[in-house]
Image: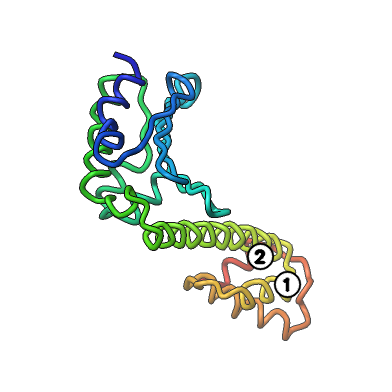
Amino acid sequence: MNFLNIVEKHFNFLVTQFGYSQELISDTWIKYLFQQQYFTVAYDSKRSYEVIISFNDETNVNNYIPFNVLCLAYGDPEKIKQLSYFFSQQLSVIDDYLKKVSLFFQEKMRPLLIGNQNEIKRIQNIWLNELHAYAKAKNENLLRINANDAWINKQYFQFIKIMENNNFVLSELDKKKIIFAQKKIKNGEGGAMGSLVGSLGELV
């Protein structure tokens, strides 16, 4: 048994029950097409050993939706942990995993499988929200790195500007640092250099 055999065993229901056609890209990359949408089931057998599943809708610019987003849209947190990301070099383990994925498709995803446009839009909105959340988190991480650099270099005005102008959720330590920096600025030390250890010592 190879990867293609496993995929066909577990996903042939898309052909027999929902009218999809199968397109073989390679022995480790299989497409199931219906109207202007398709699912892909692929396996990176050379590097990561990841099983990669996605949904694609060619009528929309945001046409690629990874399987973890489908799990988020249709599953509970436990299902997301079980199914979202999967890596294995053992075909027997992959077989068991794809059996679970197939059942998830059949039990949870029927509206998407039949090409319901409202359902496709709902899933796409979830994906866009995930992308926006990721971009926001990445931007916040970069800003916090800049804020930390400003703190270390005793650039207190810049530190406060970053921390207070970006809607961060402030920890107690963040709040103490801001109060400390405000005091330094009032004392005319907004850009003064000093002992980082001494500054941190005054926070506790």
Q: Which residue is nearer to you in this view: 155 or 192?
A: 155
User: Which residue matches tag 1?
Assistant: 158
Disc 2 packing (10 Å; few <14; some 14–19; many ≥20): many
Three-letter code for the amino acid on which mark 2 is drawn: Ala
123 displayed left or right of 185: left
Q: Classify 169 as above or below 74.
A: below
Q: Classify 163 as above or below 55.
A: below
Three-letter code for the amino acid on which mark 1 is drawn: Gln
Looking at the picture, how far across and down is residue 180, in whole percent? Answer: 62, 77
- Residue 63: which numbered mark, if any? none
Q: Are marks 2 and 1 in contact (CB under 8 Å)?
A: yes
Looking at the picture, how far across and down is residue 186, in whole percent? Answer: 72, 86
**Which residue, as the protein is rendered here, is positioned at the far bottom?**
186
**Residue lying at 30% horizontally and 45% vertically, measured from the top left:** 81
Q: Which residue is nearer to you in this view: 30 or 183?
A: 30
Element type where label 2 sits in the image = helix
**Residue lying at 48% horizontally and 24% vertically, measured from the top left:** 25
User: Which residue matches tag 2?
Assistant: 147
**Residue lying at 32% horizontally and 39% vertically, measured from the top left:** 19
Q: Classify 66 as above or below 157.
A: above
Element type where label 1 sits in the image = helix
Quadrant location of the N terminus?
A: top left
**Residue lying at 36% horizontally and 21% vertically, measured from the top left:** 4
